[in-house]
Structures are given as C-alpha cells and as structure tokens.
Amino acid sequence: MKSIKTQSIVVVLIITLFWSCSNNVSNDPAPTGEGNNRREILIHWVDNIIVPSYQRFETKLDVMVAKGQDFTNTPNNQTLLALRTAWVEAYVEWQKVEVFEFGAADRYALRTFFNIYPADVNGIMANINDPTANLNIPAAYARQGFPALDYLINGSGTDDNAILAFYTNHADAAKRKAYITTLLTRMSEMIDNVIAYWNKNEREAFISKTGLDIGSSMGLAVNAYVLHYEKYIRSGKIGIPAGATANSAGVAHPETVEAYYKKDISLILTQTAHQAAVDFFNGKNVTTGENGLGFKAYLNAIGAKDNSSGKDLSSIINDQFTVAKGKIDLLPPDFFQQINTDRSKMIDAFTEMQKAVRMIKVDMTSAMSITITYTDNDGD
Amino acid sequence: MTATNKIQTYLQKTASPLPLIFFRIALGSMLFASIVRFWYNGWIEALYINPKHYFPFYGFEFVTPLGEFTYILFILCGASALMVALGLFYRVSSVVLFASFTYIELIDKSTYLNHYYFISLVCLLMIFLPANTALSLDALRNKKLAASQIPAWCTDSVKLFVGMLYFFAGLAKVNSDWLIHALPLRIWLPAKNDLPIIGGIFNHLWVAYAFAWIGCLYDLCIPFLLSNKKARPFAYMAVVIFHTLTSMLFPIGMFPYVMMATALIFFSPEFFHNILTKVSGNNTIVTTDRVFRYSRPARVCLQAFLAIFFIIQSVLPFRYLAYPGELFWTEQGYRFSWRVMLMEKAGHAEFTVKDTQGRLAVVDNKAFLTTLQEKMMTTQPDMILQYAHILRDHYTAQGFHSPQVYVDSYVALNGRLGMPLIDPHTNLANQHESFRAKPWILPHNHDSKGL
C-alpha cells in the first residue's frame, strides 16, 4: 500500500511540475551563439541592412522629388533630362529595397504602390482628369510609382519634344503636372512612413518574434524573400515578358518588361534586384559591405548540408545564384529588343533562376524548419 | 501445462475493471477537450468546410464533408465523448463516438495524424469492452450492470494495442537516418534554440543524437517497463518527461496528453483503488461482487475479432516491404504504421494541364487547395494523383477535351538536396489509384537503411 501511495504522489507531482513548465514557455531572449541566434540575425537585418537601405533609397527619392518639382515648375528639356536621370537612379536604388516586403513594408504594401507594371496608361489618363481618384485601390496600383512615372516622362510622346508638349501645349497640361506631383509626394510620404515604422514600432516587435513558426519574423522574411525572388524577379522581370513561364504557353509579352518606355535600363534593374537578393541571403551589411548574419550564416551554423554530397547548402545556393547571375549578365540593356529578336537568352536566365527558386523555396525552408501551417502535425 | 491450457487459463482469468474504467474516463474527457479545442481554434471551418476539394482515403471516397452539418458531426462526437466519460448509455455512445470520430478523420487525408488513427482504433476496441461496469451512470442506474471483476484480457487488449503503438514507433526509428544521421531531429531542434533556459542546448549536434537514441530506446522499451510493477513509477515518469518535452518542441497538439493519460492503463487496480479511497474517504466504491462475463457467442465473436485485429495490426506496419524504393520517398505503406517524427519533407509541385486542341493552363495550387492541403500534397504521391484528377475534372468542365495533367515536382527529404518526385512525362489524368506500386514515382538517389 505504501508504495502505491508514493507512486501516486510522484505521478501527481510530475504532472503538475511539467504542466506548469510547459505553460511557462514564453518569448524570452534567445541564447547566444554563432550565426544561429535568430534574434541577432533579426537585429542585424533591421539595423544594418533594411533601415540603412531605405535611407539610401530615400536620398535618391528626395532627389527625384526635387527634380520633379523643377520639372513641373518649368517643364523644359533640361529639367526633363534631370528628372529622368534622377528617376533612373531612384528606380535602381528601389531594386535594393523591394526585397524587404515584410515588416513595415508589408504593413504599407509598399511594392504595390511603387512598382507594379506594366503601367496602366488608360488608368493614368483617367486619373489625370480626376484628381480626386482613389490611389489606394488595387485597380490604381499600376497607375502610380515608378512604372507610371516611366510612362509620364519617357512614353507620353514619341520624342522629347512631344513629351514636353504633353506638359506645356495642352489644355490638360496643368493637371498632368499635378499628377506627377501627386505621385512623387505620395512615394515620399510612404517611404517616410515605412522608415518611421521600422524605427518606432516594428523594430522591437520584429526582433522579439524569434521563432520559426507562423507569424515569426524569420518565417515572414523567408516567405517574402522567396516570393520576391520567384514572382517579382524571375517571373516579373524575365519570365513573363520572355514568355518563359509555363503559363504564358510560350507567348512572349515584350510590352510587359520593366521600364518599358525607357527600355535601356531593364538589365540594370534586374541585375540590381538579383544582387540585392543575393546580398540579403549573405547578410551583407550595406554600410561596411561585409557579409554578416543572415540566411547563409544561419544555414552554416545549423550545419545544413546536402547529405548526399556533403556540400554546404549555403554554397550550393550561392553557386546557383552565381550561375543565374552569369546568365543575366549576358543579356543586353534593352530586354524589349532582345525578346523581339532572340528570347532564348532570356529563357536561359529564367531556367537558372528557377533552379535557385527551388533551392530557397524547398531546400532552404526545409533545412531551417520553417512552419507554414497552424494545425497539429506529427512530422509525416 | 501445455500452451493451450495456459491460454485457456489466461482467458478464464478475471481482474478488477478499474484500470479500464479510468482509461474510459480519461479517453472520453480528453476527446471532449480535443473537440472543444478543435472548434475553438476554428479548425472545423478551416479544415472541413472552407476547402474546395478534399482528399478521401482509397476505398473511402464515399466519406464526404457535410458542409455546415459538419458542426453537427462534431457536436455528436463531443457529446458522445462526454457520455463515454460519464458512462452514460455506454454502448450507444461508444459506437457514436467511434463512428463520428472516424468519419471526421476519413474526410481528408491532409489531416491524417497517427494519433487520430490510434484514437479511432481505441474507440473501436472500447465499444466491445465492459468499461462501464463501475464509476458510470449506467452502473448507477442499473445495479445489475455493476461488476467488480471483468475478464483480464479485456484490459490487456488495450494494453497490448498501446504497447504495439510504442513498439512499432520504436522499430520505425531503427533506421540510418534516425540513428546514424540524427535526422530529422538535427534539423528540427535548432529551430527551438530560442526556448528559455534549455534553448541553447539545441545548437549542439550531440543533443540531436541523444534525443534520437533515447527516443528510439524509449519507444521500444516503454511498454515492457510499464508492464513491470517495480519499473512502473520510473517508466511513467519517463512517459511524462518524454511527452512533455515533445509537446514543448513540436506542434503535436493534444497527443502528448493523450499518451500520458493512456499510459495509466498499465497501473495496477490497487493504484486506482487507492486513489478512489483517498478521494471519496471510504473504500467501498465497488460494492458488488459480480463478475462480468460475456455470453458464449459474444465472447467467441469478440475474441475472434481481437485476434484478427491484432494480426492486421502486426502486419500493416510491414506492408511497405511489398513496394519497391525508399519508403520515406514514395510513402507507399507509410501511413497506419506508427511512423512519427521521422521525416522533414518539403516540396513544390507545379501542374500543367493541356489538351489536344492546344489549350494549356499552369495551375495556381492556392486556387484549389488550402495551405495545409498543398503542403501535404506536394510530398505525397497518392495525393498528387488525387489532385491531378481534381484538376482533370475541373478543366474538363472548363471545356478542355480529355485534358492531360503533368506535374513538375521537387521534393527535399531529410536535408538531402531536392529532386523530382514524379515523372514529369506521365499523364496523371490517365493513372489510377490502387494498392499496386506507382511506376511514375521517380527513384530517390538515397536509400536509408533499416526497418
């Protein structure tokens, strides 16, 4: 009898002890480690990559806004060329921040207001005539941001004189200039919001969600990163215009290239976006230029290897990025022309990028043990 | 004494029903809590009402979701669980519990979990066992039902089943990925390195190895340790520690608590009697001297049923031997075999549908499936086939003429670089589900060794 009494006391004690333990698991700071401390990675991302990148972009954006003001105040050849240069520089710099579509940018849906193309020309003309038009609705995404400006300063006339005439010798000239101002002001405000939000509210919340489950910062970042590389670099910049995606059934849509009206900067935009994705993978500090905490360091720290070959997964992915970059570098500045003459080079680049997509989407997320569903799971 | 005599003597043996009674109460309460939790989490809607398509089990295609009536099904299930716990109209409520729970689990294999399968089968066993002979409203209403002794094999068959679950789960861990490479634990544990206090240890590879080996030994030994009187307190301590740890580390819901309650069935009648005496303040809970006995035909039928049940249970986990290729890769014979926590598997599948008249569509899986369904489908060939048929039917309705369905798949298994799972040149629209090996599953370049 005595032993049974002891048994029951032991059982009850253990259950109580463990029940309370398991309920006490909270989000306390992570332990320290080399590359596998997710809190440190998140801090590095925010402080050394994301926020400084936005600040650099903001500088270029401010220049573009100023040149835009000059142009709308006095539309002439000189102010047009100055605005165009500033637009190109800001558009290139934008490619370095579009990859951060999580946290504050996700909250403001930044990409949808900055870079949805091809531009909706009819919609732009309609909005010019209706200055009160709502720019926040989905139908308005392609009527603003860089693609709309592309049309307005590069495509609204057959040559520079015609473009200038668009803003000077037309009954709607004032409205057209006002629309440019509206778009520029809007972009400027949005970036201010995003930077302010990262600095104020988002940073603490972001670096404290150190798990890998649904809603964790790294889970969100990985998903946004994969989506960006797959949909917005691979498909958007190359696959869809070249007719390389299976969905296009081999039909090219050269009119959907990025910067369609400027034409000769498609390559530099794609190269910059691809490099930004690679740099983020490697945790490159934008101020010092040195690689730091990030996906690569994390994968190395947890010992992610292809068990068949023994090679580091991070090296396999970086090698594939290099191959894809090599194919992109073979392309000419003007994708529109390339697609119309020979799209095979575009398709080559797409194919190599597709291999990288699978690695980051399947191999990397699997190695990192990112959870994608809420429900119970027994690991089968 | 001959073996037959031994068996005869064993079958005549009676024992106190208390362990089985406590098990009934625990099972009913846990299932009731599970149903409430399921409902509270919004999973009824998310898993059984919102999806546009479902993945029924082969041979059970007649099991379909009931739309809004699915809630009624869950109410039925929850209520019968509660009635089982209370021992009210036990025969009827245990049948309803088994039927409703099993129906729910058969709707969609995306939600398949080994512990749901376990619960279904335990509920099936419980229908036939005298688990309402004490501490039940039935026995309170009908004094003739109350019994202080039941055939020992009744309780023992539940113990045997639980023991088999653990033992087969342990056998499944005797493979090279689990023991030699500490996979997938070496992938999963570092993901928990942000847990307070203990998180840091998951950065060390030896911890994954320790967990793998201890886990394997635990599963193999625990049924025997729980059966041994002297080892039992320590074995139960191990049960609690093990399952608490897994509940902290992995999203496995109620399972750890169900197993902690289930293991109580191994405790002695005196243990429960003692608790009862403590709780009620007297030791006259079970007042009757009646011995519960089945009628002869019922006993023969039940014993034959149990014999068949346990033979099937012993064979099912090994049916994978009838299929070629790596089990983890093809998953032919993977389910219903107590294989838990063995694989980190992730995939990506892009379907192309075309017809003879040049129509072509690349499928956005999210337009057809939930996140969970897509995740499960991309790594499991039988679900890929079912989905291909869903697409075939959908696109036929869209005007495609006898559409062909192809899949471009990429699957990573236990940290090996991903590779195609399905032959991209096979028109899946023409393939049929069967128990035969699926020739359109491409081989994996790695074979794990073991059971």
Image: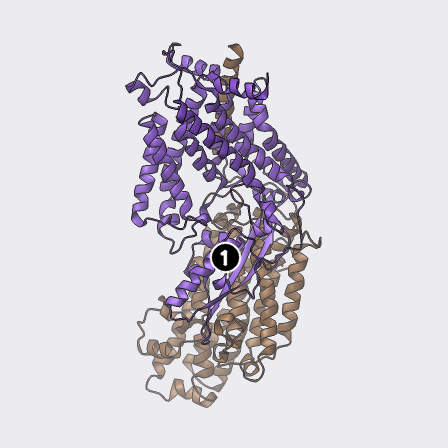
Chain colours: A brown, B purple
Report which quarter residue B364 is drawn in.
Answer: bottom left
Q: Can residue B97 be seen in this view?
A: yes
**In the picture shown, does residue B93 fall above or below B286?**
below
Between residue B438 and residue B258, name the one nearer to us: B438
Q: Which amino acid does label 1 sit on?
A: Ile
Where in the figure is residue B145, as x and y percent of width and height? Answer: 33, 19
Q: Image height check: is A135 above or below A168?
A: above
Residue A275, quarter of the rendered image: bottom right
Q: Position of B89 compared to B341: left or right?
A: left
Please, is residue A149 above or below residue B90 in the view? below
Query: Residue B191: where, in percent of width, then height?
Result: 57, 45
Relative to A216, is B126 on the left or the right?
A: left
Q: For the view shown, which residue lies furthest in the left direction?
A: B141
Question: Closer to the camera, A373 or A209?
Answer: A373
Q: Which residue lies furthest to the right in this view?
A: A310
Q: Which chain carries label 1?
A: B
**Mark 1: which secondary structure?**
helix
Q: What crowding class fits label 1: few (fewer than 14 Cα within 10 Å), some (14-19), or many (20 or more)?
A: many
Relative vertical location of residue A105 with respect to residue A148 in this rendering, above or below = above
Residue placed at 63% from the left, 32% from the top? B217
Q: Where is residue A254 in the image (x, y as percent from the top left)?
A: 50, 80
Query: What percent of the width, then of the height, locates residue B408?
Result: 55, 63
Query: Is residue A94 something that shows in the picture?
Result: no
Tell me what residue is drawn at x 55 percent, y 45 percent.
Answer: B334
Q: What is the tally of numbered marks visible in this picture?
A: 1
Q: Mark 1 points at which residue?
A: B384
